[in-house]
Amino acid sequence: MEPVIIGSATLYLGDCRDVIPTLAQLECVVSDPPYGMAFQSNHRAEKHAKIANDATEDLLQWACALQPRHSAYLFCRWDNLFSVAAVSSIKTWVKNNWSMGDLEHEHARQTEVALFYPGPEHHFPKQRPPDVIRAPRTGNDHHPTEKPVQLMRAMIEWTRGTVCDPFMGSGSTGCAAVAMGRDFVGIELDEGYFDIACRRIEDAQRQGNLFSEVA
């Protein structure tokens, strides 16, 4: 299981449940794991591949049990809260538009949430952040649930140490981390998305440290 090294990023093609036990103690985790949506957009002319292992909450629950030294931020759906380990708080991402859902019996979704788990060495690197963050959504050009780099950068600013994303997808977290001068470890099971992440992170690495941060 040889990783791809791109500057400060170490990227693994494989199952995170196999890779994580081979790594040193995790310092922080920032990720968007599968959480039981079985999601595939039907509103694109060019369809993305389905997200692997997204039929159950098993991988979300696995991610919630990782216990990094500093902190973990894990995206999920609001009703996943009933089946995961108790959280310290949740962060709410407010988008610039809304996504689909039950059009007759549900309010239009303009937010997503991320679970916050502080580790034994947690502290806020800067001032205490609010529990709401605003960032425009992407057009999902690279992945069906692609997160904007701007959003991931803001979340990484709340952490310390090497950033780990066990469900790297198309690499938004890695792009943000390397642009901030942070070390990054990413793991992705799908070879197509892994290749996209490698290209995007290489581009971000080539641009250099755009946001000066102390790791």
Image: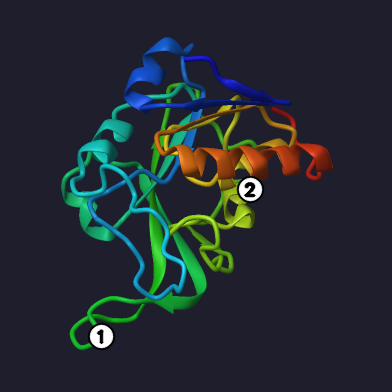
Q: In this view, does 48 lie above or below 167?
A: below
Q: Disc 1 vs disc 2: which is toward the camera?
A: 1
Where does the image place residue 38, in percent across and percent down from the top left? 24, 56
Secondary structure of the residue carrying numbered label 1: loop
Q: In this view, does 156 lie above or below 164?
A: below
Q: What residue type is labelled 1?
A: Leu
Q: Which residue is drawn at 27% across and 31% down?
A: 62
Where does the image place residue 113, in percent across and percent down from the top left? 38, 57
Using the image as rendered, state which of residue 74 and residue 91 is in the foreground: 74
Label whose residue precedes the other's in the sequence (1 or 2) = 1
The residue where tag 1 is placed is 103
Report the disc number at residue 83.
none
Q: Which amino acid does label 2 sit on?
A: Arg
Q: Which residue lies furthest to the bottom in this view?
A: 104
Q: Which residue lies furthest to the front in this view?
A: 46
Q: Which residue is drawn at 43% across and 22% down?
A: 120
Residue 160 seen anywhere in this rendered image of the structure: yes
Q: For residue 48, which quarter of the picture?
A: bottom left
Q: Is residue 201 left or right of residue 123?
A: right
The residue where tag 2 is placed is 153
